[in-house]
Amino acid sequence: MKGFQGQELTSVIEIDRKACKGCDSCKSFCPADAIDGKYGAVHRVNSERCISCGQCIINCPFGAPKDKVDVVDKVIAQLKNKQLTVVGTIAPAVRVAIGEEFGMEPGSLVTEKLYGAMKQAGFKVLDTVFTADQTIMEEGMELIGRIRHFALGEPSEHHLGPLPQFTSCCPAWVRYAELYYPELLPNMSSAKSPMMMAGALGKTYGAKEVWKVKPEDIFMVGVMPCTAKKFEASRPEFSSAAHYWRTQGGSGNYSDVDVVLTTRDLACLFKKLNIDVKAVAEFDDKDNPLVQYSGAGTIFANTGGVMEAALRTAYFVITGKELDVLEFKPVRGLKGVKEASVTMRDAKTGKEVTLKVAVAHGIKENVKPLLEEVKAGESPYHFIEIMNCPGGCVNGGGQPINPMGTSWLDKVKAVLPWS
Amino acid sequence: MAQYDYVEKAVQVSRREFIGIVGVAGAILWTGAYLATDLIQDRTKYIKMRAQGIYKDDVKSKIRQSHNNQAVTDVYKKFARNPLSPLAEELFHTKYVDRTKLV
């Protein structure tokens, strides 16, 4: 198959031939034109073009596209293995959606209950929101480096890509750029996504300083609102913890993140273990340094969130002062492309800098004009956030399929008098 | 000339009845259209509800900026030195591949 590196998952999503009615709903949500089949005929996914974002899964009225990578039983088996430390790294969007699978309202924030359920199932937790904060430190410093070098003309010790810088948290967007806009890859932030940072950090710092176990005895499970994360975790370059330990005299080869569960998969795992998230005892895990997180990390799950979090830190690093009002309204909300500019005074040189940013979500609808602008060298921005799914990770392809919206046939059925 | 004695049956609908029938038909169509658009509008409602949950988490956090997260500072103090240090580059940064060239 074309366009894959060795070991990578070549197919995450497949369409169930029996369930597909050929209605073309999926095509109207697919950002990569990866669905073949004429209107009325059975459709199939073209894996070479597919970026595994899962929008077809949550938007098909008949539930025909399926996530084919099912590792729930494997994780349950690893949880029973007492030799292993099974670590779950939970993305921010999971804590506002998992409740839906247990009869709660969409948007119910259940962090403590989720920690409690994870504890009961036998997981240790390294919160992805913690590594989201770390992503801001790495990605934010990289951005400030690029601005100081290219916009203010200061020399740089690092190798820096050109401006504007793109965010690199969304694996579907990364694969989309690699497939369809490879000339823009130098603009992509080199920072790993929070999940991959959690993998690398957990198997180095976590193993040494927190859990005090051998890194090869850690089984790292990403808990994500996303099907593309399953693909991301399988990329061969993400074994940097093993590489680090080999330079320290260790041996072995293992991935940073072993497997990924979506929010739906995690709900399925809890149900198999008879854990009810709604009823479970709350647990705040406050002695664990790896679950300490800031509000900036948690908003990564919304469109505009990475940008807002980065601005809070960039403003501090450049001006030496904290922002007075932390809520940065121009990048919030569901408008397709949001732009904003912030003027600040550089504490080091005394110069005024105007930081111009753009936020786009929904590759299908809103991203291409921005990318073409960058390709033509006419982009006025310094930093561009791109999320594949409309609304950001909260509406990711691995989230519960919500009868209120996406699976609208279920909603129609629910109001019929005979059902 | 042939005589046609067929006479169409006269439709006995008064002006008031006509207004009534058209009114009822219109109401039925309008309700259907309203239900359909309501369904479509609902689709973004749960996205907004989840997004509100996330912003709630932000507001209730004690620390609200990444650089003020002490636990992250500790990672750099005890382990990775500072952002973009050689060790941070090795563990927390990556490279991308041009997939158009992979066969």
Image (spheres, coloured by chain):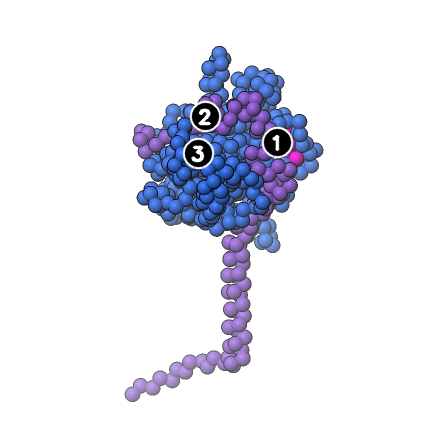
The subunit letter for the residue under badge 2 reads: B
Quick one: quadrant of the N terminus of chain B?
bottom left
Q: Is residue A289 magenta?
A: no
Closest to the camera, between mark 1 and mark 2, is 2
Within 10 Å of disc 2 (Cα), the crowding (few <14, some 14-19, many 20+) is some
> Which residue does the numbered mark 2 point to in the structure image?
B89
Chain ID for blue = A
What is the chain identity of the residue bearing mark 3?
Answer: A
Kindly identify which numbered label has been placed on residue A292: 1
Quarter occupied by the C terminus of chain B: top left
Closest to the observer: A399 or A44?
A: A399
Residue A119 x, y percent position in the rendering:
65, 28
Per the rendered image, the range of residues in magenta is A112-119
Chain that appears purple: B
Amino acid beneath label 3: Gly
Which numbered mark, 3 or 2, is in the foreground of this view?
A: 3
Tell me where residue A363 appears, x and y as whole percent: 42, 44
A6 versus A164 height, above or below: above
Q: Does residue A282 appear left or right of residue A253 in this picture?
A: right
Q: Is residue A258 above or below residue A227?
A: above
Q: Give the number of the mark in front: 1 or 3.
A: 3
Q: Where is residue A52 drawn, in percent x and y? A: 44, 36
The answer to whether the residue labelled 1 contacts the one labelled 2, judged by CB atoms less than 8 Å apart, is no
Say left or right for A283 vs A40: right
Q: How far apart are marks 3 and 2 (CA)?
A: 14 Å
Give the amino acid at mark 1.
Answer: Gln
Distance in Å between CA atoms under marks 1 and 2: 23 Å
- Give me the disc on residue A145: 3
At 63% across and 25% down in the image, what residue appears? A122
Is residue A355 at all visible to an observer of this figure? no
Tell me if mark 3 has few (under 14), some (14-19) or many (20+) residues whose alpha carbon lies within 10 angstroms of its own.
many
Question: Could you say which quadrant of the image residue A98 lies in?
Answer: top right
